[in-house]
């Protein structure tokens, strides 16, 4: 299918992914297959994150505001068909995520770590065509592919055993995603709005400061070299100081070149003109982050006080404490489609703050920094890691949003008609919102497929509950650290002491 025949939203997602990857990708180390893999993985992450709002919309759209089913959804078979379609959507996207995390991305990562120049092209073509088998790509042509096996696979997935196996695999990966959310998303939610509010330092001031520092270091180097002007060798201490000063001088000169380029950059001039808008956007983002913090704290406190206990995954029936975000979503429900727009914005907010957190922190393995994310100088392996982390974060996003608005994520804006028996007659009262603790019949309210995935295993829900507390703590720490930091340099992250002149030339060109 041609790109022009794709739906508009898919074109927008693919265009954004292409621009984002190309913005940070190293021009000298870029590889075609790693670029395609990164773009596809990022697109899958964004598409999967959009599935939850669609799930909520479909279960809500089946009913009228008065609590009765619409004509096309009155038949139970029709509703079941829609629910199965959403479920197959989860099956498909989650299976693709499993494939990317366990096979495709690791293979591409190690393929370019240890690739053989002689047979790489031949193997790569085979790998691209059939990436679903965990075998060496050069012998894929020897494997007989059977359509009956694919049909059998989907039949197994459709059974209760297939659902349990897939749910367990996804929940296991979601635990890793929870760690990524605690690390990157919590920090990104604090650093992104504050960076927009504080802005960057003045380029003119930075250039003046750079010139003064450069002259000072050059003066110190001249003083050390003057000691050996008469032919006497420098002491070991002076030689170490000279090497350190020369390395520092090299970094300062490269910073000066980058500052000169930044001063002529049109994007920086446009950014300065849009400074008031950035401040407003930063204030909006920090208010949203604080709303999430308060809502998540109330939700966790409600579970701690009124849930069925740790052995049930802290499951709670209804909300005993007022949940501001849940109430806001239900209040917006009469004005279509404001509640769906808000839940979509919330989902995308989690994704983009996660991207901001990864960009600012880099890729870490415990206390070891593996890669840095820099504009036009990020290695292909770093981009693959970034996309893999985002895929894992997206898996945990559904539970985070459920924690923020449990009633809305479970039932959407559905209502039901409560009938009260008075003697021999049944009196129908005003429609009420569907809740976990409501008195509705099971046929009156439809649960989202996402909720079923989230609560398949109680022990995972227990771990997620404690993960929410860790998220709140890390967010507060990140907020304090971000407030204490000064303004960022306009060339923040572009020049480091461990960079080479080769990477500097790459940026310039």
Image: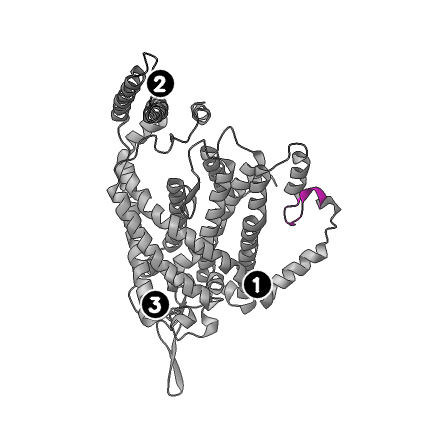
**What is the x, y in percent for residue 13?**
48, 42
Q: Residues within 10 Å of mark 2 (few under 14, many from 20)?
A: few
Q: Position of residue 431 (x, y in %)?
A: 37, 70
Name the front one of labels 2 and 3.
2
Quadrant in the picture for the C terminus: top left
The residue stretch that appears in magenta:
130-139
Which residue appears at 38% of the width and 44% of the height? 357
Q: Which mark is residue 303?
A: 3
Residue closer to the observer: 229 or 484: 229
Name, please, the residue furthest toward the front. 232
Q: Is residue 203 left or right of residue 60?
A: left
Asked where in the image residue 420 lies, by quadrant, the reply is bottom left
User: What is the chief secondary structure element of the magenta stretch?
Assistant: loop
Q: Residues within 10 Å of mark 1 (few under 14, many from 20)?
A: few
From the image, tell me which residue sits under label 1: 165
- Dot 1: element: helix
The reply to whether residue 8 is visible in this rendering is: no
Q: Quadrant of the N terminus?
A: top right
Q: Relative to residue 501, is residue 200 drawn left or right?
A: left
Query: At x 37% / y 33%, what residue is drawn?
Result: 493
| SS category of the residue bearing label 3 | helix
| Callout 2 secondary element | loop
Tag shown at residue 233: 2
Q: Nearer the viewer, residue 79 or 300?
A: 300
């Amino acid at each position: 299918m041609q790109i022009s025949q794709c739906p508009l939203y898919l074109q927008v997602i693919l265009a954004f992914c292409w621009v984002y990857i190309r913005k940070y990708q190293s021009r000298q180390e870029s590889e075609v297959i790693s670029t395609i893999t990164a773009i596809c993985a990022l697109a899958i992450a964004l598409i999967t994150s959009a599935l939850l709002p669609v799930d909520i919309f479909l279960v809500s759209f089946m009913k009228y505001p008065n609590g009765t089913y619409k004509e096309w959804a009155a038949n139970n078979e029709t509703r079941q068909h829609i629910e199965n379609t959403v479920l197959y959507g989860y099956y498909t996207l989650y299976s693709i995520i499993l494939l990317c995390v366990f096979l495709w991305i690791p293979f591409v990562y190690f393929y370019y770590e240890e690739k053989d120049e002689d047979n790489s092209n031949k193997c790569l073509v085979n790998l691209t065509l059939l990436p679903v088998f965990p075998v060496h790509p050069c012998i894929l042509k020897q494997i007989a592919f059977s359509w009956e096996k694919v049909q059998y696979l989907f039949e197994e997935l459709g059974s209760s055993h297939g659902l349990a196996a897939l749910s367990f695999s996804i929940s296991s990966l979601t635990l890793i995603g929870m760690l990524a959310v605690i690390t990157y998303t919590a920090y990104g939610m604090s650093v992104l709005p504050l960076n927009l509010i504080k802005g960057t330092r003045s380029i003119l001031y930075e250039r003046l400061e750079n010139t003064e520092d450069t002259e000072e270091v050059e003066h110190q180097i001249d003083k050390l070299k003057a000691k050996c002007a008469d032919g006497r060798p420098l002491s070991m201490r002076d030689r170490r100081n000279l090497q350190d000063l020369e390395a520092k001088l090299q970094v300062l000169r490269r910073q000066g070149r980058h500052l000169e380029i930044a001063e002529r950059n049109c994007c920086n001039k446009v950014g300065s003109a849009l400074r008031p808008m950035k401040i407003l956007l930063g204030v909006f983002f920090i208010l949203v982050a604080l709303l999430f913090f308060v809502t998540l704290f109330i939700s966790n406190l409600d579970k701690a006080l009124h849930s069925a206990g740790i052995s049930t995954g802290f499951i709670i029936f209804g909300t005993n404490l007022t949940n501001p975000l849940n109430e806001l979503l239900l209040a917006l429900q009469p004005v279509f489609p404001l509640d769906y727009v808000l839940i979509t914005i919330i989902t995308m907010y989690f994704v983009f703050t996660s991207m901001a957190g990864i960009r600012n922190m880099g890729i870490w393995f415990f206390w070891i920094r593996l890669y840095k994310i820099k504009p036009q100088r990020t290695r292909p392996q770093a981009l693959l890691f970034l996309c893999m982390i985002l895929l894992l974060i997206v898996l945990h996003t559904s539970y985070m949003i459920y924690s923020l608005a449990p009633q809305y994520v479970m039932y959407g804006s559905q209502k039901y008609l409560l009938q009260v028996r008075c003697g021999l007659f049944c009196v129908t009262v005003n429609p009420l919102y569907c809740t976990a603790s409501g008195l509705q019949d099971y046929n009156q309210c439809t649960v989202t497929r996402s909720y079923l995935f989230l609560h398949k295993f109680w022990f995972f829900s227990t771990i997620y509950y404690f993960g929410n507390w860790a998220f709140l703590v890390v967010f507060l720490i990140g907020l304090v650290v971000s407030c204490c930091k000064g303004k960022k340099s306009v060339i923040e992250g572009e020049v480091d002491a461990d960079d080479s002149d080769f990477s500097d030339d790459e940026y310039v060109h």
